[in-house]
Amino acid sequence: MKKKATFVYAAVLALLLSSCGGNAAPAETAAPNDDTLTASETAADTAPQTAGSVPAELAKSIGNPVAGFDAEGALTYGGDPSALVVGDTLYLYVGHDTSKNDSYVMPDYLCYSTKDMVNWSYEGSVLKMTDVSWADKNSAWAGQVARHYDEAAGKDRYYLYFCSWASTDDGKQSIGVAVSDSPAGPFTDIGAPLINGSFTTNETSAWNDIDPTVWIDEDENGEEHRYLMWGNSKLYVCELNEDMISVRDYDGDGEITFGKDVRSKIAPDSFTEAPWIYRRQDGNGRYYGDYYLFYAYSWREHMAYATTGDLMEGKLYYQDIIMKPTATSNTNHMAVVDFLGKTWFIYHNGSLPGGSGYRRVACAVPLEFYSDGAVAYVDESAAGAFGTVSAITSLNGDVLEHEWFNNSLGDDAYPYKDKKLGSVLSKTSESDRQWVIKQGSSSPDDPFTVSIESENKPGLYITVRDGQVVLSQDYDGKMAEAQTFRTVEGLAGSGVSFEPLGAPGTYLTLSGGALTLTDGTDAQAASFTVETTDK
């Protein structure tokens, strides 16, 4: 549904109230009756306004990312998302990114929760690597939590499968498991790796054994199977015992053997890492059809999927790429879960200030299936499932867009910091003209400021730098002011104008196919309508 954005003009009311010693009323509050006005207030009400001096409030969009904060609301990075649904709550887990450079520094796993995919709560740290005796203290690499009924305890328990460098196994990446009575932790490691890296003897690197994914369901005979799959470049699978912390003797010979009980699969095309098992459910909650294996494909990492009818014995059939590399992270890692009547695709990018492939954040969008079971393509989205996208059009009729570009496969192209902005640029798509209006980055409490993010290139904002206006990532975490604009009544007398906080007295101006900064003399080109559409 499209709608014109609402502009709130508050200057006159603020002057009236301030002269009486009061606070500015909400935008919906009516002005006092005329017989209560003093002479000075009447003069203020009728005094002419200087162009660009009347604040205008734009509605702000919610959207992605869905995490990225701690208990105090401070910026907090975390990647490799996984998710678990328990009743009416979805729990989201990430490895906590604390790196200051281009390396992985991940001391613990963090948990968030939501009941509606809009409002998220920080549950805290659920497993610290300092509490895992065999693991590297800064390598909380990708993990996943599963719920399973513990017969001996008579209750559900929760199992966090994770990976880290094992000091007890020549420093190789190995698979671990930690246990909790709550999905929000804390989790306690079992004291040793579940799968040592050296056990998978066909390994070609010390990090083949990473990124565990777990799946539990019943076969047609009602027998429960508990699958664990993992790998980087190589792909491994086994079944777990009912205790969830030991490998099942799959062939029944009394020994746990690589090649028989733990198997090396032929990986699907361009498999890199980040496997995630998923299966669809019917209206009664019963699983049906093939298993889906979502995974990271090639480099920079795309998202792709394969299917199979049997996780242990069957061949994995490559199907398709469903997401391109993101605009802000070299890696990606997905979780696919059913919640609130939808299937959700949860992934990571580097869209927070200072973000990158080493300082990531989780995002979520709905995942759609075609009637034949094929997975629909997934576009990276700043608005997510519940936000709004906006078309920004100057009063002279020019529509603001960014240049079209595919996210590069080459690491040296990043970060993006100088993409063109204008109108009628060559080879653009509709999504290149969609913007997400967010609260001003440098002024979180000022309703009359905004930051303008690209919908299809999340993390890239309209930025004023060295007198130029470009589309750029806040790659060093220092561009908040350069990406924040004061919103004022349109210089042409209608619409809205955007005044950069870092360059007061100048305004975004769309003219001659280019977005520039001017003094606003061409008021039509420096005034805009903002039309929003619900996602």
Image (cartoon, grey):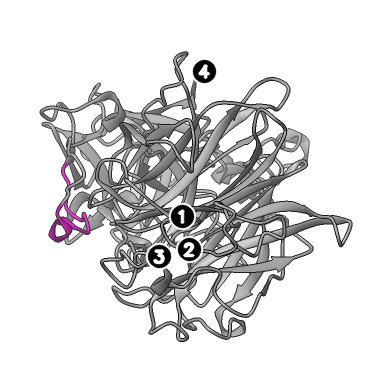
Cα distance between the residues tagged 3 and 1? 17 Å
Q: Label 2 is placed on what type of residue? A: Thr
Q: Would you name the residue on which mark 3 appears?
A: 209
Q: Label 4 is placed on what type of residue? A: Met
Cα distance between the residues tagged 1 and 4? 56 Å
Contact (Cβ within 8 Å) of mark 1 with mark 2: yes
Q: Would you name the residue on which mark 2 appears?
A: 257
Cα distance between the residues tagged 4 and 3? 47 Å
**Extent of the magenta region:** 410-420
Q: Would you name the residue on which mark 4 appears?
A: 1
528 on left or right of 294? left
* Name of the residue lying farthest toward the front: 253
How far from the left and from the top, in percent, is residue 410? 14, 54
Q: Is residue 219 magenta?
A: no
Which of the two discs, 4 and 3, sits closer to the camera?
3
Q: Would you name the residue on which mark 1 appears?
A: 260
